[in-house]
Amino acid sequence: MKKSALLLLLALLPLFQGCVSTSTHPQIVVHEESNATTQKVPTWFSKALREDERYFYGAGEGKSIDDANRSAAAALKQQIAESVGRHCEKKRSGCAWLTKRQRQEMVKRVAALGPVTKVLKKEKSESGRWYLLVGAERKTLAGPLRKRVLQRLVPIEERWHSVSKASPLQRYQAARRSEEDLKVLLPDFILADAILPYGKTMRMRVLRAIPYFQSIQKNVLKELVFCVEHPRIPAYTLFSRALGRALHTKGYRTVPPSQRRSGTVCVDVSARLVHREKGSLHTLTADITLKFHRPYQDPFLTKRYRVEGESGESGPMALEAAAEKFRRRLEKEGFF
């Protein structure tokens, strides 16, 4: 079993364990008021199905019909949970992309399903104990999930088609956002697929789209050429150089301003610097603004960063420390 599937199954099952017996064999039930009275459970109860192509089933028993109904509903949800766990064992289920938080969300969604059950069989024994078989139609369970998936998926596809002729950077941004948005809808998609399997086309629209957008990002980055503009104020030079080094470290191509072309992504660097001195400690706070634009055009993206550098020697040394922190942050977080 894959680690992601195992983690999901282990997370789901504790919600339902202990709620109901799942034995597939006939049971002898001792009436609570008299040890002399025994009653075999109904044959249909002991041989009840767990699921088929149309329904999930749950069999439950109790002193009252309400108790039996609650027990049967818990058993039904356990069958759904186990079905989701088995689904996640599949190689292309999408569960490998789930975050820990999304797995927790899926647990809550399974637990919150209903009320969508119908009583298929019920019987009261001579001892007064109730036995119920309830079912939940797969189509009814999956309907709201499928609707939410489509509501999120269609805008993702429309946005991607709208940037087919855009600049490389805009396509990179759109591909990255599309990947992130697809992963957001994964819990609903996986639950819906486990309950009522999707067809090949729908799986491609989600499960193949994620690696597709990852590939697009990787390939588009090779097309990008950056130019860090000369700063207008000398004090910003250290931050411009830090940006240039970070671009180089991340593998982006850069050119000097004299070699920029129409497709070059130009970056203007500006900053607001505040220097404080306390005893021998110099602290410099820099609020840095990066504006991305095509040559001689208005910015299409603005990014802001705040970094702080310290030095026990001088203000310029604190400025250098702030620029170094800026470089490390860019290399860690990326640019877009």
Image (cartoon, rainbow, N blue to C red):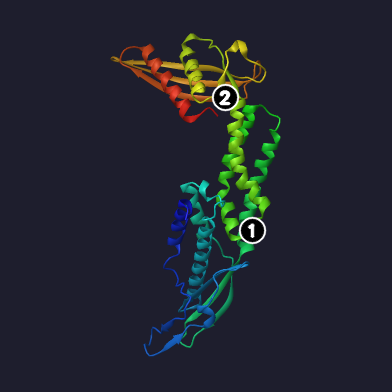
User: Which residue does the numbered mark 1 point to in the structure image?
Assistant: 143
Judged from the image, the secondary structure of the residue bearing numbered disc 2 is: strand
Q: Where is residue 288 in the image (x, y as percent from the top left)?
A: 49, 20
Q: Going by the image, does 182 lie left or right of 284?
A: right
Name the residue at the bottom extreme.
36
- Asked if residue 308 lies left or right of residue 288, the reply is left
Q: Position of residue 18 (x, y in %)?
A: 41, 68
| Nearer to me, 268 or 332 | 332
Identify the mark at residue 302; answer none if there is no mark.
2
Identify the residue at horizontal 66%, vertical 53% (top origin).
200
Q: Residue at x 48, y 75 (%)?
A: 24
Q: Which residue is drawn at 45% across and 26% down?
A: 329
User: What's the residue type where badge 1 is placed?
Assistant: Gly
Q: Count neighbours of disc 2 (C-alpha within 10 A) and say few if under 14, some if 14 to 19, many if 20 or more.
A: few
Depth check: 96 or 285 in front?
96
Q: Which amino acid does label 2 sit on?
A: Thr
Dot 1 or dot 2: first in sequence order is: 1
Q: Position of residue 273 (x, y in %)?
A: 44, 16
The residue located at (53%, 63%) in the rendering is 80
